[in-house]
Image (tube, helix red, strand yellow):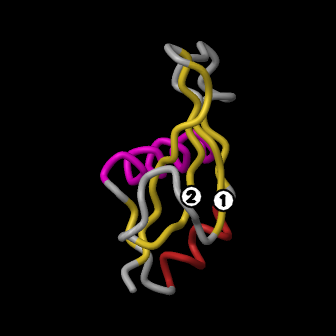
Amino acid sequence: MAVVIRLSRTGKRNSPLYRVTVADQRRWRDGKFLARVGWYNPRTDDKKSRINLDMPVIDEWIKKGAQPTETVAKLLKDYRAQTQA
């Protein structure tokens, strides 16, 4: 079973919100997931409240072999830079 960390879309039309989820790769985008590890709001102007991730849980899933998608990898990089600055 390949496990991925990816975005799941929620919110209204033209106002997207995304949940960062850990799911089986074969599941559909908004389907059943193993864990919800954060959220991403691309529409907010405040950079601090744009991304909220549970990094200890994400790091545990990555140690277990979960692969983040390209978009989630960029979000992780931005979030780590934001929290260290």
Task: Residue 74: say if magenta.
Answer: yes
Which image quarter holds the N terminus?
A: bottom left
Expressed as whole percent of the image width and height from the top left, the position of residue 50 reads: 61, 29
Which quadrant of the rendered structure holds the C terminus?
A: top right
The residue lying toward the viewer, choosing from 45 and 33, is 33
Q: Counting residues from the N terminus, which is met first, the one under dot 2 or under dot 1? A: 2
Above or below, 15 against 1 in this view is: above
Magenta-highlighted residues: 70-85
Residue at the spot x=48%, y=51% of the render? 76
Location of mark 1 (residue): 36
Q: Amino acid at mark 1?
A: Arg
**Cα distance, mark 2 to mark 1?**
4 Å
Q: Residue at x 69, y 58 (%)?
A: 54
| Secondary element type, mark 1 | strand
Q: Element at badge 2?
A: strand
Q: Residue 51 appears in which quarter of the rendering?
A: top right
Query: Badge 2 local density, few (<14 within 10 Å), some, or many (20+)?
Result: many
Question: Where 69 sits versus 18, above or below?
Answer: below
Q: Residue at left 60%, top 47%?
A: 84
Task: Decide which of 39, 25 is in the foreground and name it.
Answer: 25
How many labels were placed on the picture? 2
Residue occupying the point 56% across, 51% down: 20
What secondary structure is the stretch in magenta mostly built from?
helix
Residue 46 horizontal/vertical position (percent): 64, 18
User: Mark 2 belongs to which amino acid?
Assistant: Thr
Mark 1 burial class by Cα count in 10 Å: few <14, some 14-19, many 20+: some
Q: Is residue 1 left or right of residue 48?
A: left
Q: Which label belongs to residue 21?
A: 2
Specify whether residue 81 is painted magenta. yes
Q: Are marks 2 and 1 in contact (CB under 8 Å)?
A: yes
When the figure is inspected, residue 82 is found, relative to residue 12, above or below; the finding is below
